[in-house]
Image (cartoon, grey):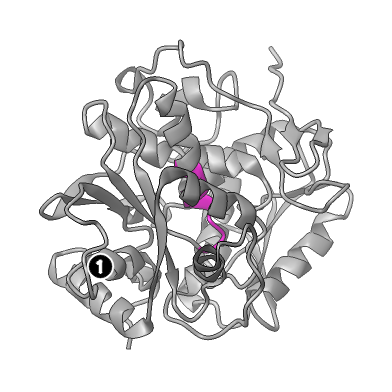
Amino acid sequence: MTHALPGYVCPHDGTGADARTAPWCCPVCGGPWDLDFTPDPATALEPAAGPNSLWRYAAALPLPGAFAVSLAEGNTPLVPLAERVHAKLDFLMPTLSFKDRGAVMLAELARRVGPERVVADSSGNAGTSVAAYCARAGLDCEVFVPEGTSEKKTEQMRAHGAAVRVVPGGREAAARAARTAADLPGVFYASHVFNPYFLHGTKTYVYEIWEALGGHLPEVLVVPAGNGTLLLGAALAVEELARRGVKPPALIAVQAAAVAPLASAFAAGAEDAEPVPQLPTLAEGIAIPAPPRARQILAAVRASGGTFLTVPDDRLRAAQHDLARRGLFVEPTAAACWAAVGPTAPEDPLKGRTAVLPLCGAGAKTGLAP
């Protein structure tokens, strides 16, 4: 039986498109797609009865029918970090990062669309996830990465069978190269930024928190923000759960101080973010100088009553070491949220509220920050 796929819709101009045949971006404005999909709040959510993967939330996901792609992703532990603060250990995902939540959705979507090859761009973790899930789905994959990407991450991509294209320049240069390839016939662009199916995968992060906390959410969700894929997925889940009567939390978004276009725009009261220089930072995974979904990220944080925080490299380094001494070895980017609200923070931005933060990527991929 063939199931219809929810279509794309542009959040800026309302352009709609079929998910099976659409270009990778809105043909009118060139922006990223949203998805014409809203789960029915009257449909029962029974994750305990589902498979041991994020597909246990099938009732809230936009890919109907039987799924074929999975590595038992999701259902990661929630552990205490401090009084009233918990960490969700998404670095325990199959490819050691939270990006598996979205990559499994893109790989399943691509399997149904049937392209000749899949193309992605990444500073590391998204590329390893897409490569792994394409391998699981039997799809040819090509990943464009900026020069300087961790050799451990590119080695992982190649191990999964992906062709890795190292692009001179920074993160934006790799994205441009991938988008050029994505315009060719027979190519599916597995973009964790432009394709909204990815966001409907990352939203399961919040559904799992809701489940683990017995049908509630904390007062605050602290989330890293580069391209904003976890934050926007979290905002989707918060909105969907609110329709089921769950009290929504505030969203605190965290950026690296060296590359913080969203935090600057938020502080200025702007609706969109101006591009900033691509400066070096330990938090390479969130060092995005021009996030394509900036308007949506800013609007989501404001609507939640949240705010933005920035962290310099010295606090990122200290937070990574502090987490390691607590038994949690994560990469520097994954330490950003703890750097923002943990013991190295200059003040208490949580103001005594309960909070959950993600530890998104394993330290085995990068090692300790020097």
Question: In which quadrant is the N terminus drawn?
Answer: top right
Assess whether residue 227 is covered by the magenta stretch: yes
Q: Which residue is drawn at 75% across and 40% down?
A: 10
Residue 194 x/y as whole percent: 68, 50
Per the picture, the main secondary structure of the magenta-coloured stretch is helix
- Quadrant of the image occupied by residue 341: bottom left
Which x, y percent locates residue 63? 60, 26
Left or right position of 362 against 15: left
Secondary structure, mark 1, is loop
The residue lying at 20 percent from left, 47 percent from top is 354
For label 1, the residue is 329
- Residue 113 on the magenta span: no
Please name the residue shown 15% across and 64% down the image. 327
What's the amino acid at mark 1?
Phe
Query: Going 28% across and 29% down the picture, which residue do you hit?
Result: 211
Q: Can residue 335 be seen in this view?
A: yes
Q: Is residue 150 above or below residue 37?
A: below
Q: Residues within 10 Å of mark 1 (few under 14, many from 20)?
A: many
In the image, which residues are magenta?
A: 226-234
Is residue 88 shown to the viewer in this render? no
Q: Residue furthest bottom?
A: 370
Q: Which image quadrant for residue 206? A: top left
Q: Which of 248 and 269 is in front in this view?
A: 269
Q: Where is residue 64 in the image (x, y as percent from the top left)?
A: 60, 20
Observer-nearest of 34 and 128: 34
Residue 309 occupies quadrant: bottom left
